[in-house]
Amino acid sequence: MVVLTLIISMGAVLFLVNKKVNIGYSLMIGAVLLSLLSGRSFSYIINVFFKTFSQATTITLALTIALITVLGHLMEKYLILDRMITALEKMLRSAKATILIAPAIIGTLLVTGGALMSCPVVDKLGNRLNIPKDIRASINLIFRHALYFFFPLSPTIILAAEIGNYNLWDFVKLQFPIAIAMYILGYFFYLRKYHEPKLEKIEINQYIKAIREFILYSSPILVSLFGSLVFSLPFYISLIIGILVSIVINIYDKSRDNKYNINENVLKTIYKGFKPSMVIAIIGIMVFKNVVNDFDKLFIFLNSLLDKGIPVELLIFISCAIISFPLASTQPSIAILYPMILPLAPNPHIKLLYAMFIYVSGFMFYYISPLHMCQVLTLEYFEVKIKDLYKNYIYILPLTYLVMVAIYVINIL
């Protein structure tokens, strides 16, 4: 009965998401259905919603995600990001290094379909390096998404740490080698054989100017990171400072050149950067998590499967395939599997390893999904077919996944 109950509620979530219903609303409906089918009363459901909306974790997480979207919008609107990339290319003095790093930096904006923003940069540099279109598309996607394993301002990583109730920085350190492996493999498979174009020489004072410009235009992101990492500020406070830095940069720019004057009230620009759909998604995830945490029969069932000799890793892999591939998202795997699997861990160290296994498995199935928005937009931009991308992924994705498995095995022994 417990399996049927879960299948029905999960089926409802998948159906609603495929009908373009916000994943937050879909998970809320799935949570209500799961509660009713498991014999819970309406008063229980009301209490879960009240508890979720009043939890400090939910409020902090929703605020953090909202501020990240605002920061990304300001950096795009004020042309801060464009100038950061231009300064980066001058500073690195390498088309290969820039084409590797630029998608990742643009990826810090973490907007849905945001890979389209880095397509022109990759296309321009790829043309100078004589890279085929299908490889350019793969470069744009791989070098952007490797960031998702360790970037501490990623909404998915923040969400995972909150739901999993573990230290975010411990998780980032654990997964950092996976990102490095993906970058190295990406360079080996996609860039190694192409020759650097001859660059125009620049004077030392021009190079120093490029460094200053890069520091200036990357400062909203750097401030947001260092505020949390170095000064132990809450993420939302660091992000507010990053937003203020973006506004100050724009004020300075407008005083020098009117082309940076977007003729819009700063509060209106901030409002436009706010994405209610992402906040609703976070709330829905937290509601579903709270219901699953109370679903005792589920944990008993999972333990019975483990007692029969079914490896927890196999359960995770199959579940992530079922959840993340059709939904083209890592977050549902985290929202659904973290409350189910992590409590089975005998200690915090194993819990962190289970969390990584779920996160990376969910990511891989999200990444290869034909509904993955970044992939769809990149294919359109470069006018290549999805089979060409899959051909380019045939080695890099399995090898990256094996790095995660190696980390898991070494740490669990």
Image (spheres, rainbow, N blue to C red):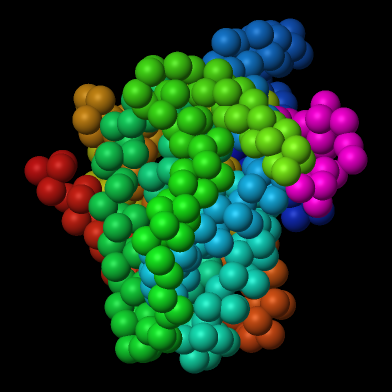
Does residue 275 appear in this view?
Answer: no
User: In which quadrant of the rendered view does residue 155 lie?
Assistant: top right
In the image, is residue 410 above or below residue 41? below
Q: Residue at x 40, y 49 (%)?
A: 149
Residue 361 on the magenta segment? no
Q: Which residues are magenta?
A: 257-280
Q: Residue at x 25, y 25 (%)?
A: 348
Q: Quadrant of the C terminus?
A: top left
Q: Residue furthest left?
A: 413
User: In which quadrant of the rendered view does residue 38 lie?
Assistant: top right
Q: What is the total number of numbered labels drawn onto the structure image?
A: 0
Between 107 and 99, the one nearer to me in the picture: 99
Between 210 and 191, the one nearer to me in the picture: 210
Secondary structure mostly seen in magenta is helix
Residue 163 percent across, percent down from the top left: 48, 27
Residue 273 on the magenta segment? yes
